[in-house]
Image (cartoon, helix red, strand yellow):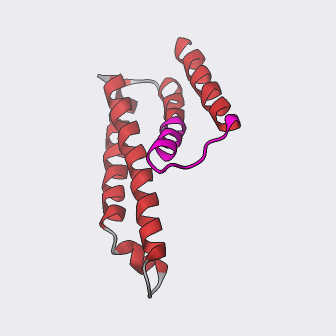
């Protein structure tokens, strides 16, 4: 159950990052007014807030069930997931150095989970 909660938390926080990016892009392209007002009018912005809240709630469930020193490294998978989403959903360019970083993050999480 704990690992399911970790996955749920990561999924919600990754979705929140994607929604924030999409809302900011749309607000930046909108005409007139202050950027923050245009952003607050975006439904994606509010869905991002909801996803962040759900991610936090599920993370609290993780912390209830697992030592924080063992749980916290799993948050690094958020970097990996956000990069994958930005590459394959937003079609952003991801260079070799970032892919190497992803491999190192995954290796580090693997090592820390053994302890």
Across and down, in percent, residue 22 comes to 42, 60
Q: Quadrant of residue 58?
A: top left
Residue sitting nearer the eye, 43 or 113: 43
Q: Residue at x 50, y 47 (%)?
A: 86
Q: Residue at x 61, y 42 (%)?
A: 94
- Left or right, 90 with respect to 108, comes to left
Across and down, in percent, residue 85 comes to 46, 43
Reply above or below: 48 against 88. below
Task: Looking at this view, name the residue that lies furthest to the top.
Answer: 114
Task: Looking at this view, name the residue that lies furthest to the bottom.
Answer: 32
Reply above or below: 18 against 115. below
Rendered-image quadrant of the N terminus: top left
| Magenta highlight on residue 30 | no
Range covered by the magenta-colored residues: 78-96
Give the main secondary structure of the magenta stretch: helix
Rendered-image quadrant of the C terminus: top right
Q: Residue at x 41, y 80 (%)?
A: 37
Residue sitting nearer the eye, 11 or 53: 11
Across and down, in percent, residue 6 comes to 38, 30
Q: Residue at x 48, y 74 (%)?
A: 28
Residue sitting nearer the eye, 71 or 4: 4
Q: Quadrant of residue 97?
A: top right
| Magenta highlight on residue 80 | yes
């Amino acid at each position: 159950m704990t690992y399911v909660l970790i996955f749920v938390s990561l999924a919600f926080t990754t979705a929140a990052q994607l929604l924030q990016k999409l809302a900011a892009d749309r607000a930046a392209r909108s005409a007139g007014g202050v950027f923050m007002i245009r952003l607050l009018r975006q439904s994606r912005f509010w869905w991002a807030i909801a996803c962040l809240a759900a991610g936090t709630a599920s993370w609290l469930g993780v912390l209830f069930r697992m030592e924080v020193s063992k749980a916290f490294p799993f948050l690094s998978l958020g970097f990996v997931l956000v990069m994958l989403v930005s590459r394959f959903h937003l079609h952003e360019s991801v260079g070799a150095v970032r892919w190497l970083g992803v491999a190192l993050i995954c290796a580090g999480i693997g090592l820390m989970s053994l302890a």
